[in-house]
Amino acid sequence: MRSVIQRVSFAEVRVDGKITGKIRLGLLIFVGFEEGDGAEDIEWLSGKIVNLRIFDDEQGIMNRSVVDLNGDLLVVSQFTLHASTRKGNRPSYIRAAKPETAVLLYEKFLLQLETDLGKPVSAGIFGAMMKVSLLNDGPVTIVINTKNRE
């Protein structure tokens, strides 16, 4: 699994002009799945995301998590996170999980995030053409890959 996490003051996702997910203070999470991803990856990544200390404390130091702030999460599936640009100029997505596998992982990931966050999570619609709007706070953007746990 690969994810791009952005600390936001506001984010929303629209499908066909309709808002499917919207948050204020919290994290916008783009996530892509590859063949071989499973429950261990989902649990590890969810726990890492909700506990990331990337929000400022009273002294202006990044020392608080989204849980500490009672912040929100907005999750958007994005297979293009597995793009390989090694050869040529047209990205290859051969490492991305097939849609029938990825949608199940996406649904499990959303449930795990809700469990770890302790409240509902907003989301886009898997496989849909989405329009994402956000106000990145900081900016703070973090990339996490479960294969190297970095």
Image (spheres, helix red, strand yellow):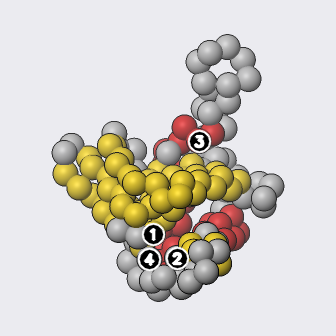
Which numbered marker is on residue 26? 1
Mark 3 element type: helix
x 54%, y 54%: residue: 139
Decide which of tag 3 and tag 2 comes sooner along the chain.
2
In-image side of 86 versus 91 (left or right): right
Residue most extreme to the front:
59
Decide which of tag 2 and tag 4 comes sooner along the chain.
2
The disc labelled 3 sits on which kind of residue? Answer: Leu
Decide which of tag 4 and tag 3 comes sooner along the chain.
4
Residue indicated by mark 2: 66
Q: Nearer the viewer, mark 3 or mark 2?
A: 2
Residue most extreme to the top:
88
Cα distance, mark 3 to mark 2?
23 Å
Are there few (<14), some (14-19), or many (20+) residues within 10 Å of tag 4? some
Are there few (<14), some (14-19), or many (20+) residues within 10 Å of tag 3? some
Mark 1 element type: strand
x 59%, y 75%: residue: 60
Which numbered marker is on residue 71? 4
In the image, residue 99 above or below residue 135: above
Q: Are marks 1 and 4 in contact (CB under 8 Å)?
A: yes
Cα distance, mark 1 to mark 2?
6 Å
Are there few (<14), some (14-19), or many (20+) residues within 10 Å of tag 2? many
Q: Are marks 2 and 4 in contact (CB under 8 Å)?
A: yes
The disc labelled 2 sits on which kind of residue? Answer: Val
Q: Are marks 3 and 1 in contact (CB under 8 Å)?
A: no
Residue 30 seen anywhere in this rendered image of the structure = yes
